[in-house]
């Protein structure tokens, strides 16, 4: 059985859990308290020297420490990964873009507004910058999704799961999702897929 080290409320952790849930892959979940510094503890660093979550130990003992690498590995050979070479490359493209142009802005804005609001005033200037860049990302997605039901090949894939992780909670970073009707419709389509489960339901599951 796979073992996933995770933390509550993380979109990067959620997307890995969502894919395994939708693929009916059994896994053991170990919750790590990031806010208390548990990822920097000697015990956790002995497991993952990079000191981050999620962290996946496969059933054969091999390890993966990047959420999108986990998605690609777990999706290989399943309906969530296109067989066509070019469409597979488009999946990679969206996942690379998510980590460079989407998550780095939407995630911290949400963190300092919804999870650590006591630091919001001190981070106000950075939050404004993150929101500006996050809105650019959502606008880019909205334009694409106004012409497509899903991100790659008009079918639900691991690219959608990768982008869903933080887009579904973008409103918690005070991103006005009503400005992005195509993204909102895409979120609704994902929530209608087989074995879909919301972030907090998976986070609280045993």
Image (cartoon, grey):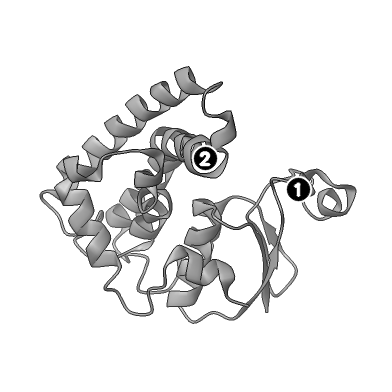
Of labels 1 and 2, earlier in sequence is: 1
| Residue 39, label in figure | 1
Q: Quadrant of the C terminus?
A: bottom right
- Name, please, the residue furthest toward the right: 42
Residue 90 seen in this snapshot: yes
Q: Give the image location of residue 204, x and y in percent.
A: 57, 70
- Name the one closer to the observer, 15 or 121: 121
Residue 155 against residue 50 in the figure, above or below = below
Residue 172 figure quarter: top left
Q: Which residue is mark 2?
A: 111
Q: Is residue 155 toward the left or the right of residue 113 in the image?
A: left
Q: Which of 179 and 14 lies nearest the eye of the viewer? A: 179
Mark 1 neighbour class, 10 Å CA radius: few under 14, some 14 to 19, many 20 or more = many
- Residue 106 image position (x, y, % from top left): 41, 38
- Image quadrant where residue 58 sits: bottom right
Occupied quadrant, residue 23: bottom left
Q: In the current view of this chain or complex, which residue is farthest to the left?
A: 147
Task: Locate the N terminus and report the quarter of the image it occupies.
Answer: bottom right
* Residue occupying the point 86% across, 52% down: 46
Q: Which residue is found at the position 74% from the left and 45% from the top? A: 51
152, above or below 28, in the image: above
Mark 2 Cα-neighbour bin, 10 Å: few <14, some 14–19, many ≥20: some
């Amino acid at each position: 059985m796979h073992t996933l080290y995770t933390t509550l409320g993380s979109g990067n952790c959620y997307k890995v859990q969502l894919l395994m849930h939708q693929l009916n892959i059994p896994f053991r979940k170990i919750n790590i308290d990031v806010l208390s510094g548990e990822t920097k503890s000697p015990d956790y660093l002995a497991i993952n020297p990079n000191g981050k979550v999620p962290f996946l130990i496969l059933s054969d003992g091999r390890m993966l420490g990047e959420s999108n690498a986990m998605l690609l590995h777990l999706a290989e050979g399943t309906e969530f990964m296109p067989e066509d070479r070019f469409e597979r490359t488009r999946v990679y493209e969206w996942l690379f873009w998510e980590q460079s142009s989407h998550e780095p802005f939407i995630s911290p804005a949400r963190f300092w507004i919804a999870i650590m609001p006591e630091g919001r005033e001190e981070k106000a200037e950075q939050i404004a910058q993150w929101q500006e860049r996050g809105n650019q990302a959502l606008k880019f997605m909205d334009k694409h999704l106004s012409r497509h039901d899903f991100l790659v090949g008009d079918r639900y894939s691991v690219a959608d799961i990768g982008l869903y992780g933080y887009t579904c909670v973008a409103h918690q970073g005070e991103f006005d999702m009503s400005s992005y009707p195509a993204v909102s419709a895409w979120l609704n389509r994902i929530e209608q897929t087989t074995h879909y489960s919301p972030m907090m339901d998976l986070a609280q599951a045993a």
